Image (cartoon, coloured by chain):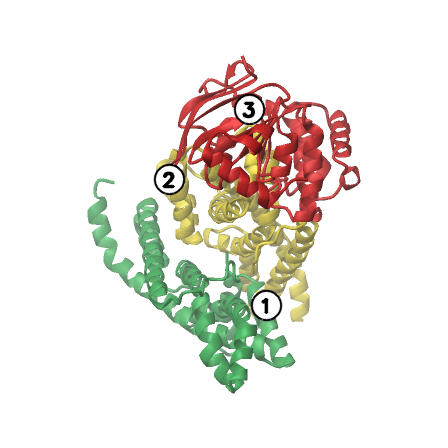
């Protein structure tokens, strides 16, 4: 059985069916990138997986456990699923260090000292240990997002979901965040929704192309970019690929 | 309790009498308070330094002391220097002076929130300062103040009950009078509470409707402009 | 001579001041704790809870404080419940303050971006933990200006306890007046000055607190 199994997810928002039956799987330490036109339910799909926005129909299985079941302990499950937001969502009233340690202290019940040490390590990993006692308002967008990634990483998740992690950043700051994400490839499973084609082409193990609430096509980057099977995928990847280029 | 309805009907005339005074207190003081407040607000925004200081002094002194103290000073204190008011007069004066200070603050806030660009544009058209205030700043400032003003109305409606303490026969006083005779405090004051509640809800509704009629697209209420609460 | 007798009255006034401060302290304590519970209950509690809380707020914001005092002090005795005047005043002040504070706190909660609680959930925090560690600290900081306003209002409203015979500052003033009518103006002016100093000090202190706890990057709500 695969680590993550998404089975036939349906979701309706305000009378519009945003996800019309999405299914795919992921293995440990795999990196999959979801691309597609805006508004096709990509972010919604991520939120259906960690249940921030439970699906109307369908199932999600993580490590052999059905997390969409009403009996599931969603808080414990969320410890295994990291989430990185487009708008960062760092806790405004806490320092960078505390943003990372609070999950360790209050959710994983680790003692304060160990938690803070661990948090500092994570900050070091993303290159921000000097910003440990700064507040989110004092950080640049790129720094905020790196703290966000560190916060998710600190929880030791099986998989991290990235919801357009660089879309809210100034172009020159995107590189730093992508570098951090690249360093994680192969170490933890990543499911990334993004427009960054360079990242998709060079880091993803597989690309999922979504449109209109369906998965239109999925496959390894090499195939998808040069020889996609469906016409729509070929169109989109060709046009967007040219626009956003690579790195 | 079985004779609640007859009791209620029996008490009604006195209560309505009191209600009349309550309305008198509320309407007169909010109106007088408006003019006092407007003068103070204009004094603070456009006045000379001396005028400004006077206005600040008035506002801070009144807002920094309880209404009841102000009423006592007017009703009990002033006679000792020869100025005597009836309870009703003292209450009206006290409420008006008090309301004036609070209205001054949120009117000032509204005026300042409109100020800069509008005033400059008006002057550049050749309007005098007074004209600019009258035709450009105030029409907008007054609309922005409506939510705060609505709050002030409700506030005065409720605080008019303080006049009971200086022997004005408004609604609460009538209630106390009836209750002292019949010992039916619970029923009488529950009734009175409901009357105030209904008045509060109805006035809010009415003022909201008036606000809608007068509203201009694009002039939203500035959030939290010097509200009393 | 008037000055002497005025000075003689000081102990009485100080007594009254003590009661006034007592009413304020207990009143604001009740109002704040109840207000926080009401706001959180309405924003995060189960749906059926929202309606009764709304009614509570509307009722206690729509009845004059004096009427509330009468209901609690006199009215409840008809149901067999009797509180002394001081307690009645504290309950009245507290319940009314709770209704107003609930409004302030709800406004603050609404200004916290929804992403904050989503991030908390994503870390595996339960609703309770998310409220306790992420929402509440921010809500309280944002509410400081509104709370300060409410505090001074309550301080001034303690004067209404006069109406049910609590022997606070106003009542002491009246006793002094009755005993020595020539002192009436000085004593009430003095009382006004005492209130003024209390309000002024409270405001200045709370401004300092507000500045200290202002969250970097979070706009303090416009107030006053």
At mark 1, the secondary structure is helix
Q: Which mark is residue A145?
A: none
Does the rendering let one see residue A126?
yes
Residue beneath disc 2? A14
Horizontal side of B132 relative to A182 (left or right) equals left
For the residues beneath circles 2 and 3, the answer to whether they share a chain is yes
Alpha-carbon neighbours of circle 3 within 10 Å: few (<14), some, or many (≥20)?
Answer: some
Image location of residue B114, percent across then percent down: 52, 70
Looking at the image, is mark 3 or mark 1 nearer the viewer? 3
In the rendered structure, which disc, 2 or 3, sits on the residue that comes first in sequence?
2
Distance, label 2 to label 1, CA atoms, is 54 Å
Image location of residue C163, percent across then percent down: 46, 54
For the residues beneath circles 3 and 1, the answer to whether they share a chain is no
**Chain A, which colour?**
red
Distance, label 2 to label 3, CA atoms, is 27 Å
Image location of residue C93, percent across then percent down: 50, 48
* Relative depth, front residue between B4 and B146: B146
Horizontal side of B174 relative to C98 (left or right) equals left
Horizontal side of B163 relative to C139 (left or right) equals left
Q: Residue at x 67, y 71 (%)?
A: C1
Chain ID, mark 3? A
Residue beneath disc 3? A75
Q: Which mark is residue B61?
A: 1
Chain coloured yellow: C
Q: Residue placed farthest to the left in the image? A: B6
**Chain B, which colour?**
green
Alpha-carbon neighbours of circle 1 within 10 Å: few (<14), some, or many (≥20)?
Answer: some
Looking at the image, is mark 2 or mark 1 nearer the viewer? 2
Q: Residue placed farthest to the right in the image? A: A130
Chain ID, mark 2? A
Q: Is residue C178 above or below residue C31?
A: below
Quadrant of res B123: bottom right
């Amino acid at each position: 059985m695969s680590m993550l199994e998404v089975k036939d997810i349906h979701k309706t928002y305000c009378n519009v069916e945003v996800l019309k039956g999405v299914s795919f799987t992921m293995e440990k330490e795999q990196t999959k990138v979801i691309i597609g036109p805006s508004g096709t339910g990509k972010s919604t799909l991520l939120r259906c997986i960690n249940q921030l926005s439970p699906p109307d129909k369908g199932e999600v299985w993580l490590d052999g456990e059905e997390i969409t079941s009403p009996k599931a302990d969603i808080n414990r499950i969320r410890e295994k699923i990291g989430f990185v937001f487009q708008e960062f969502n760092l806790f405004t009233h806490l320092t960078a260090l505390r943003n990372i340690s609070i999950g360790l202290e209050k959710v994983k019940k680790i003692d304060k000292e160990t938690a803070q040490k661990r948090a500092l390590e994570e900050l070091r990993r993303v290159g921000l240990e000097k910003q440990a006692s700064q507040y989110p308002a004092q950080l640049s967008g790129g720094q905020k997002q790196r703290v966000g990634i560190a916060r998710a990483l600190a929880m030791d998740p099986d998989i991290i979901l990235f919801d357009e992690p660089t879309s809210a950043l100034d172009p020159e700051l995107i590189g730093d965040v992508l570098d951090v994400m690249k360093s994680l490839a192969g170490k933890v499973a990543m499911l990334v929704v993004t427009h960054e084609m360079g990242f998709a082409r060079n880091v993803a193990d597989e690309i999922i192309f979504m449109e209109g609430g369906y998965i239109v096509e999925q496959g390894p980057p090499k195939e998808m970019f040069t020889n996609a099977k469906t016409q729509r995928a070929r169109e989109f990847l060709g046009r967007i690929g040219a626009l956003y280029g690579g790195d | 309790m079985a004779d609640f309805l007859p009791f209620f009907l029996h008490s009604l005339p006195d209560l309505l009498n009191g209600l009349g005074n309550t309305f008198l207190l509320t309407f007169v003081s909010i109106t007088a308070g408006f003019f006092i407040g407007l003068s103070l607000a204009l004094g603070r925004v456009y006045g000379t330094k001396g005028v400004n200081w006077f206005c600040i002094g008035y506002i801070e002194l009144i807002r920094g002391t309880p209404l009841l103290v102000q009423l006592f000073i007017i009703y009990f204190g002033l006679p000792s220097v020869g100025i005597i008011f009836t309870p009703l007069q003292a209450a009206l004066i006290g409420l008006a002076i008090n309301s004036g200070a609070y209205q001054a603050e949120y009117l000032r806030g509204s005026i300042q929130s409109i100020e800069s660009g509008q005033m400059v544009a008006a002057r550049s058209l050749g309007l005098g300062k007074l004209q600019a205030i009258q035709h450009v700043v105030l029409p907008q400032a007054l609309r922005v103040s409506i939510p705060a003003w609505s709050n002030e109305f409700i506030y005065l409606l409720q605080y008019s009950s303080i006049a009971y303490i200086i022997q004005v026969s408004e609604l609460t006083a009538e209630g106390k009078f009836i209750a002292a005779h019949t010992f039916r405090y619970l029923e009488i004051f529950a009734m009175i509470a409901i009357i105030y509640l209904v008045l509060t809800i109805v006035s809010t509704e009415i003022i909201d409707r008036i606000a809608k009629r007068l509203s201009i697209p694009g002039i939203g209420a500035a959030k939290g402009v010097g509200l009393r609460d | 001579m008037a000055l002497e007798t005025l000075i003689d009255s000081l102990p009485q006034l100080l007594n009254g001041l003590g009661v006034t401060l007592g009413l304020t302290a207990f009143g604001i304590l009740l109002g704040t704790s109840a207000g926080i519970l009401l706001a959180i209950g309405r924003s995060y509690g189960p749906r059926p809870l929202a309606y009764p809380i709304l009614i509570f707020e509307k009722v206690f914001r729509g009845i004059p404080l004096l009427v509330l005092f009468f209901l609690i002090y006199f009215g409840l005795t008809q149901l067999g419940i009797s509180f002394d005047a001081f307690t009645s005043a504290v309950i009245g002040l507290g319940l009314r303050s709770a209704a107003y504070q609930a409004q302030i706190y709800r406004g603050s909660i609404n200004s916290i971006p929804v992403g904050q609680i989503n991030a908390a959930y994503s870390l595996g925090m339960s609703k309770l933990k998310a409220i306790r560690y992420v929402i509440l600290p921010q809500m309280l900081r944002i509410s400081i200006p509104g709370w300060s306003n409410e505090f001074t209002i309550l301080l001034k409203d303690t004067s209404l306890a006069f109406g049910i015979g609590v022997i606070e500052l106003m009542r002491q003033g009246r006793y002094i007046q009755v005993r020595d009518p020539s002192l009436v103006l000085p004593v009430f002016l003095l009382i006004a000055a005492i209130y003024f100093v209390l309000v002024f000090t409270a405001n200045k202190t709370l401004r300092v607190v507000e500045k200290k706890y202002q969250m970097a990057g979070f706009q303090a709500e416009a107030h006053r």
